[in-house]
C-alpha cells in the first residue's frame, strides 16, 4: 500500500517543532492537513495531522479556543493516538481546565502507559489519592479528618530522619 503524501510532510512538521521551529512546523502541519483533505486515500494519520495543525495554531498563532476545538475533534477521530491526548491535555491546561486535562492524560495513558510526555503532564498536574474511606464522598467530614491525619503523618515521616 503506498504511503499517503501527507505522511512525510507531517513527520517534517513534528521534527521542526521538536527542533524549536514552531512557525515552520505550523506551515508544514497546515500543508499536511490540506493534503489529507485534497488527496484521495483517507490516510490513517488524518486525525493526527488535524491534531498537530490545531495544536500548533493554538501555540503559534495564539488561537487557543479554535485550536482546542480542533484537537477535541481530532480526539474523536483519532482516539487511538496518544499524542492527540497529549495535545488535548496541554491545551485544556492553557484554558484552565485541570479536570479535562487529567481526563485527556488518563485516556492517553490507557493507549500508551509508558508515554513519557503524558507521564510528565500527569506528574506536573499531580494526582489525588483516593479518599481514606472510598464508600464516603471525598467531602464527607470523616474523610476530610482522616485525610488530614494521613497528610500530616506523611509530612511528619518526611521530616523525620531515617535510622
Image: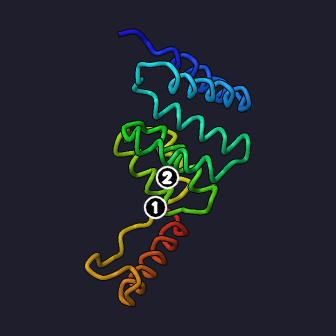
Q: Identify which residue, 16 or 113, lies in the foreground.
A: 16
Residue at 56%, 62% in the rendered image: 97
Label 1 CA crowd tier, 10 Å (few <14, some 14–19, many 20+): few
The part of the image, by quadrant, that contains residue 138 is bottom left
**Residue 45 place in picture, x, y as percent:** 44, 27
In this rendering, the answer to whether 2 lies above or below 139 is above
**Mark on residue 154?**
none
Residue at 72%, 40% in the rendered image: 60
Q: Identify which residue, 42 or 155, lies in the foreground.
A: 42
Quarter of the figure with the N terminus:
top left
Mark 2 or mark 1: whose residue is earlier in sequence: 2
In this rendering, the answer to whether 10 lies above or below 78 is above
Residue occupying the far bottom of the picture: 141
The part of the image, by quadrant, that contains residue 21 is top right
Q: What element carries label 1?
A: loop
Residue at 46%, 29% in the rendered image: 46
Query: Taking 150 as reference, is 133 left or right?
Result: left
Count the numbered circles shown: 2
Q: Mark 1 points at which residue?
A: 127
Q: Identify which residue, 12 or 32, lies in the foreground.
A: 32
Query: Taking 89 as reference, is 96 left or right?
Result: right
Q: Identify which residue, 1 or 128, lies in the foreground.
A: 1
Residue at 59%, 51% in the rendered image: 91
Q: Spatial distance from mark 2 to mark 1, Cα to Cα?
A: 7 Å
**Residue 66 place in picture, x, y as percent:** 62, 49
The part of the image, by quadrant, that contains residue 18 is top right
**Residue 81 place in picture, x, y as percent:** 41, 36
- Are discs 2 and 1 less than 8 Å apart at CB? yes
Q: Is mark 2 on a helix, strand or loop?
A: helix
Q: Name the residue under label 2.
A: 122
Amino acid at each position: 500500500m503506498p504511503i499517503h503524501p501527507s505522511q512525510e510532510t507531517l513527520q517534517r512538521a513534528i521534527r521542526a517543532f521538536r527542533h524549536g521551529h514552531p512557525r515552520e512546523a505550523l506551515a508544514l502541519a497546515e500543508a499536511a492537513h490540506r493534503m489529507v483533505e485534497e488527496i484521495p486515500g483517507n490516510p490513517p494519520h488524518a486525525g493526527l495531522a488535524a491534531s498537530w495543525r490545531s495544536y500548533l495554531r493554538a501555540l503559534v498563532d495564539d488561537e487557543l479556543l479554535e485550536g482546542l476545538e480542533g484537537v477535541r475533534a481530532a480526539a474523536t477521530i483519532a482516539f487511538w493516538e496518544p499524542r492527540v491526548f497529549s495535545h488535548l491535555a496541554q491545551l485544556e491546561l492553557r484554558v484552565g481546565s485541570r479536570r479535562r486535562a487529567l481526563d485527556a492524560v488518563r485516556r492517553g495513558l490507557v493507549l500508551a502507559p509508558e508515554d513519557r510526555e503524558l507521564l510528565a503532564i500527569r506528574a506536573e498536574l499531580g494526582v489525588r489519592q483516593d479518599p481514606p474511606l472510598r464508600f464516603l464522598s471525598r467531602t464527607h467530614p470523616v474523610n476530610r479528618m482522616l485525610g488530614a491525619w494521613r497528610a500530616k503523618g506523611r509530612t511528619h515521616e518526611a521530616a523525620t530522619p531515617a535510622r
